Amino acid sequence: MGINEWLSRKEAIKEKIMWVDQIVGNEFSKFYFFAKSKEQINRWKEELEKLKQEIDFTTSISSDHNVEVMVANVNKATGIQQVLKHFNLSEKEAMAIGDSDNDLPMLRLVQHSVAMKNAPDRIKEITDDVTEFTCDEDGVSYYLTSRFLL
């Protein structure tokens, strides 16, 4: 289980996250599915792929033990595109930093992409640069400071 998932569990234990067995309502932006084992989460992924035949949604993976379910055709790249449009900027004027599969659309969109040191090799291979430090070591802050404030 990854550090982010562990932190989520800790928050849930503190009752800051509400875990439910049944979903009520129809206005959601994202669902997270977690499992203790890769086999269990892979079964969930298979079920979600079957559901995609009936319901239009997007899935993304940010660790070996989760899958994220979002509104169809909405991801970090589409969010960045909206921000860029609002400020009349292009993808050539943007940089993105990421560390997992759910960052791939964003990293592929921008002119300059950066992987976190803790990112898997498959993420690092498609980026222009890699941070010197991990997420837990404030890698984004160090990277931006070293590139833009010195």
Image (cartoon, rainbow, N blue to C red):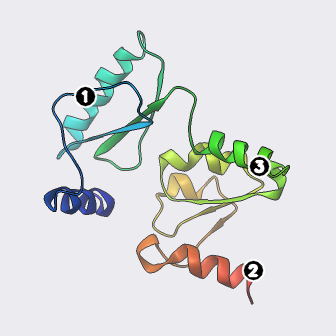
- Secondary structure under the numbered disc 1 in the rendered image: loop
* Amino acid type assigned to the residue bearing label 2 in the image: Phe
Q: CA distance from mark 2 to mark 1?
A: 45 Å
The one of 125 and 81 positioned closer to us in this rendering: 81
Q: Is residue 121 above or below residue 136?
A: above
The residue that disc 1 covers is 23
Q: CA distance from mark 3 to mark 2?
A: 20 Å
Q: Is residue 89 left or right of residue 79?
A: right
The residue that disc 3 covers is 84
The residue that disc 2 covers is 148
Tell me which residue sits at (81%, 52%) in the image.
Answer: 87
Q: CA distance from mark 1 to mark 3?
A: 34 Å
Tell me which residue sits at (25%, 28%) in the image.
Answer: 23
- Does the residue at mark 2 contact the one at mark 1 (Cβ under 8 Å)? no
| Residue 87, numbered label | none
Dot 1 alpha-carbon crowd within 10 angstroms: few under 14, some 14 to 19, many 20 or more: few
